[in-house]
């Protein structure tokens, strides 16, 4: 079936390093993708999105890359900080409905000082 | 914090109790959502309301009953829950007119424990 998943459930990095969190999707009709960050005790927080007509989008210290050929999405965080420690989810929307987002399980990012 | 608030933040209830979760969005959005978040599982969509009409009911047991009195408020009424219903219940909102925006904004959630 269609699914959105993550390659690695946990990622541990040193403060100041760059982090890369990966996500695979299988719905070829997906045309919109979002990355969320969820800190302990909080709801998911929107980080960045990308549409399928793009392959790269940059925000503040974050970059999302989309490879439609292999159905792969990644989130790159530059100069990772302790405050970046959280669970990161990717989500996809197929465009058939503006309502439905399909979420991955999440990757726990731990930043070591 | 986001423009979506939820109360209570924590709730412990017995299986015979009746309680309600409340969500309010201050973003002017026209769609609201209830999600269930359990440990080690992806977010599960429960209900979607668009323009105060329910447009999605994702095979949720009838012991969960949503209510959307207006575009800013969403409730989840709970009765005769089971221990496996213990989870974080998240409310979200979005603006669905046109295709320009589809991101959903989440509240902090209600941590529900059923004893």
Image (spheres, coloured by chain):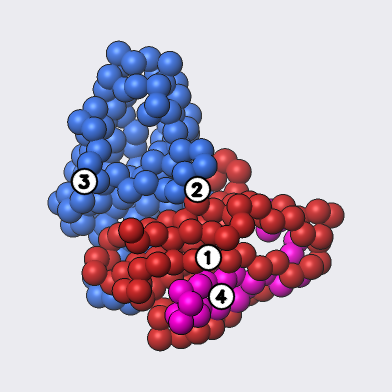
Tell me the tag on residue A23.
1
User: Do callouts 1 and 2 mark residues in contact (Cβ within 8 Å)?
Assistant: no
**Which region is colored magenta?**
A62-86
The quarter holding residue B79 reads: top left
Chain B colour? blue
| Nearer the observer, A67 or A85 | A67
Q: CA distance from mark 1 to mark 2?
A: 20 Å
Q: CA distance from mark 1 to mark 3?
A: 27 Å
User: Do callouts 3 and 2 mark residues in contact (Cβ within 8 Å)?
Assistant: no
Task: Please name which of the two marks, 1 or 4, marks the residue nearer to the observer.
Answer: 1
User: Which image quadrant: the C terminus of chain B?
Assistant: top left
Q: CA distance from mark 4 to mark 3?
A: 32 Å
Task: Please name which of the two marks, 2 or 4, marks the residue nearer to the observer.
Answer: 4
| Tag 2 subunit | A
Task: Please name which of the two marks, 3 or 2, marks the residue nearer to the observer.
Answer: 3
Tell me the tag on residue A43.
2
Q: Residue at x 64, y 71 (%)?
A: A76
Chain A colour? red
Q: Position of residue B59 (x, y in %)?
A: 22, 41
Q: Position of residue B58 (x, y in %)?
A: 24, 46
SS of the residue under disc 4: strand
Q: Residue at x 24, y 27 (%)?
A: B63
Mark 3 Cα shell of 10 Å, populated few (<14), some (14-19), many (≥20):
some
Does the magenta-highlighted stretch encompass residue A67?
Answer: yes
- Residue B107 makes an appearance in the image: no
| Tag 3 subunit | B
């Amino acid at each position: 079936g269609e699914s959105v998943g993550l390659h690695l459930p946990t990622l541990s990095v040193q403060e100041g390093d760059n982090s890369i969190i990966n996500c695979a999707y299988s719905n070829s009709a997906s045309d919109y993708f979002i990355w969320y960050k969820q800190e302990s005790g909080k709801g998911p927080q929107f980080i960045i999105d990308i549409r399928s007509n793009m392959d790269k989008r940059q925000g503040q210290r974050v970059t999302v890359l989309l490879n439609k050929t292999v159905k792969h999405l990644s989130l790159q965080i530059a100069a990772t900080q302790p405050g970046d420690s959280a669970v990161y989810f990717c989500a996809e929307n197929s465009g058939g409905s503006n309502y439905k987002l399909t979420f991955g399980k999440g990757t726990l990012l731990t930043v070591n000082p | 914090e986001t423009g979506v608030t939820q109360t209570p933040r924590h709730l412990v209830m017995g299986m015979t109790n009746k309680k309600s979760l409340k969500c309010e969005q201050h973003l002017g959005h026209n769609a609201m959502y209830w999600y269930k978040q359990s440990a080690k599982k992806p977010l599960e969509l429960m209900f979607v309301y668009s323009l105060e009409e329910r447009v999605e009911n994702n095979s949720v047991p009838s012991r969960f009953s949503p209510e959307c009195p207006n575009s800013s408020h969403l409730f989840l009424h709970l009765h005769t829950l089971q221990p496996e219903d213990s989870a974080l219940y998240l409310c979200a909102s979005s603006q669905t007119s046109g295709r320009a925006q589809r991101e959903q904004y989440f509240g902090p959630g209600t941590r529900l424990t059923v004893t």
